[in-house]
């Protein structure tokens, strides 16, 4: 691991340039293609990265018509996608039972400062699609 | 002769019949009635006839009504018979069902169960190669979080951190450390406010609350977070989120009071000797005789944040937070910290976040110490490129720049300790909770003990 300083600087610069290129390219593609997406991200063409999002599952399973909505029409599935992704990869609703989701949502309501009405909508979405 | 006798008898019979008729017929004179009596009698007969006719009509109506009643009674009897038959059949089926299968258990809606205990958390192990040292499996870490929900608005949560590490050279074996990361009782007072008490994770920035184990995309914490902030504190807190818009925007706040940092040698002398104890003041000293919160006044802090979601997976969050309080036993000097934080998500694939941290505290010997540091990190999931390559789709490229500037030396107007670190790495997602992380850290520091390192980490969130 002992490297000469010029070589070290070269490696650092190369890494930084590569990372910056990938990120900028990805960000640009995200921004460009985001116009095609609706309010909930569209499922990818191929199998998505497991941790990238489970928005495909959201699209497939969210019982939009059955969700009670706020006056601005945000559903539990949308609020779930908004809040959970702030801190960690989204967890699939089927990973927990309805009772477990109730406990977890109380934890998350406190930890992420989620307003109570929004937390209830997210909880209902998770429980409606939970593993029984 | 015989024929003559018959003829004679017939004649006699006729004569006898004539005599009888003559005697029986009344005389015409004796049967005479006046016209008035006849008319009265006739009128009476007519009236009687009308009455008889009326009675007959009434009788006909009554007979019709009776017939209808009989018909209704007959229908009701038929319905009753059918109902009894249905009830008999149902009873028979019920009996048959109960005889053929056991009584089913009453279903319980789990969501209505009022109490629940569960475990979450994460586990990691690391391999590290530090420049100038042998590579080694560095540590194994198990960090469970226990949640107990006692009703709809009461939650107790406690996190532990168990790590395994080699003992120092000269003493063989290894040591397992077991720490209480946090333990707090939460009472959700209403939709917008929660009371929390206990060993709290302090909301100075957001990293301390969101950087544990598998949540962090880089195995190491930012230098400034580890070096400058207390992390936790024993006290009470009010926190919550208030909706401020129609698209999910919310104002987040935390206000807390904790014991705060202390002095490791009970004096207020220079932090250069490590006398500032950020994790101090948690209760009774280990000898059990002295209260540790020696300066007598708690430390107060707060954070105010604004979360703006544009649509699912697109959001911006910014916040400002700070804490201040006495740290030396005499209560002559304050320790204060201020943090600016921001986080940005552009789609499910891109995330960037960063914090700027500055602290200052007074001392008896060399005056006020200033320290500061900051970090910015970003990650991009290659699934966002929509490539038809499964392995690539599971990969996220991450990078971070962070710095730490240590104690300010007023003599030469410079920070005594300067470290800048550049980190590049990746996260490979086996699942949404099983992560294989790797990164290389380039360090530029005036501290010779700081060296580049390469770290691999397998992390599981549960």
Image (cartoon, coloured by chain):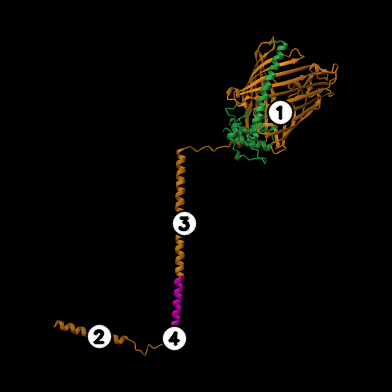
Chain colours: A green, B orange
Label number found at residue B76: 3
Image height of A41 relative to B30, above or below? above
Was residue B43 drawn as part of the magenta stretch in this picture?
yes
Q: Tell me the magenta residue range.
A: B34-57
Among the two numbered marks 2 and 4 on one chain, the one whose residue lies closer to the N terminus: 2
Residues tagged by mark 3 and mark 1 found on one chain of the structure: yes
Q: Chain of mark 1?
A: B
Q: Label 2, label 4: how many angstroms apart (C-alpha)?
A: 38 Å
Q: Label 1, label 2: how many angstroms apart (C-alpha)?
A: 148 Å
**Image quarter of the C terminus of chain B:** top right
Tell me the residue that label 1 is attached to. B343
Among the two numbered marks 3 and 4 on one chain, the one whose residue lies closer to the N terminus: 4
Label number found at residue B16: 2
Front of the two marks 3 and 1: 1
- Residue B245: horizontal and vertical position, in percent? 71, 38
Among the two numbered marks 4 and 1 on one chain, the one whose residue lies closer to the N terminus: 4
């Amino acid at each position: 691991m002992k490297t000469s300083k010029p070589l070290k600087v070269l490696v650092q610069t190369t890494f930084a340039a590569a990372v910056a290129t990938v990120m900028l390219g990805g960000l640009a593609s995200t921004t460009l293609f985001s116009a095609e997406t609706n309010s909930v991200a569209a499922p990818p063409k191929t199998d998505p990265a497991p941790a990238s999002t489970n928005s495909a599952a959201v699209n497939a399973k969210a019982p939009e018509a059955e969700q009670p909505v706020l006056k601005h029409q945000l559903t539990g599935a949308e609020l779930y996608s908004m809040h959970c992704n702030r801190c960690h990869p989204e967890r699939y609703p089927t990973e927990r039972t309805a009772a477990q989701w109730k406990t977890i949502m109380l934890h998350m309501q406190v930890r992420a400062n989620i307003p109570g009405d929004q937390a209830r909508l997210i909880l209902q979405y998770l429980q409606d699609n939970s593993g029984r | 002769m015989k024929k003559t006798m018959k003829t004679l008898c017939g004649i006699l019979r006729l004569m006898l019949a004539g005599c009888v008729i003559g005697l029986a017929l009344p005389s015409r004179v004796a049967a005479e009635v006046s016209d008035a009596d006849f008319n009265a009698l006739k009128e009476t007969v007519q009236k009687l006839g009308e009455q008889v006719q009326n009675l007959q009509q009434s009788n006909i109506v009554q007979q019709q009504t009776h017939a209808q009643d009989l018909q209704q009674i007959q229908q009701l009897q038929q319905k009753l018979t059918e109902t009894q038959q249905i009830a008999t059949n149902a009873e028979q089926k019920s009996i048959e069902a109960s005889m053929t299968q056991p009584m089913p258990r009453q279903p319980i809606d789990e969501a209505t169960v009022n109490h629940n205990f569960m475990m979450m958390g994460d586990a990691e192990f690391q391999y590290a190669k530090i420049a100038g040292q042998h590579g080694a499996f560095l540590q194994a870490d198990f960090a469970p979080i226990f949640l107990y929900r006692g009703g709809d608005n009461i939650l107790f949560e406690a996190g532990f951190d168990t790590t395994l590490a080699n003992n120092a050279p000269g003493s063989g074996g290894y040591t397992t450390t077991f720490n209480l990361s946090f333990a707090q009782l939460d009472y959700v007072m209403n939709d917008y406010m929660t009371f929390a008490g206990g060993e709290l994770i302090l909301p100075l920035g957001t990293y301390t609350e969101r950087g544990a184990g598998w949540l962090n995309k880089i195995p190491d914490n930012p230098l400034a977070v580890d070096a400058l902030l207390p992390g936790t504190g024993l006290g009470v807190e009010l926190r919550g989120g208030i909706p401020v818009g129609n698209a999910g925007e919310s104002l987040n706040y935390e206000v807390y009071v904790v014991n705060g940092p202390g002095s490791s040698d009970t004096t207020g002398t220079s932090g250069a000797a490590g006398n500032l104890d950020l994790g101090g003041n948690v209760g009774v000293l280990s000898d059990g005789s002295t209260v540790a919160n020696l300066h007598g006044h708690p430390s107060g802090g707060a954070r105010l944040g604004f979360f703006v979601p544009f649509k699912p997976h697109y959001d911006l969050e910014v916040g400002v937070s700070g804490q201040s309080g006495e740290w030396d036993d005499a209560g002559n000097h304050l320790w204060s910290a201020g943090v600016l934080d921001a986080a940005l998500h552009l789609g499910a694939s891109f995330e960037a976040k960063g914090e700027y941290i500055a602290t200052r505290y007074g001392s008896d010997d060399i005056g006020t110490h200033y320290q500061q540091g900051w970090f910015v990190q970003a990650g991009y999931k290659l699934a966002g490129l929509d490539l038809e390559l499964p392995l690539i789709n599971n990969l996220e490229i991450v990078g971070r720049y962070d710095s730490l500037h240590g104690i300010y030396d007023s003599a030469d107007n410079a920070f005594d300790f300067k470290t800048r670190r550049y980190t590049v790495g990746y996260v490979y997602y086996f699942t949404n909770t099983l992560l294989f992380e790797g990164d290389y850290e380039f360090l530029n520091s005036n501290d010779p003990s700081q060296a580049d390192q390469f770290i691999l980490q397998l992390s599981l969130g549960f």
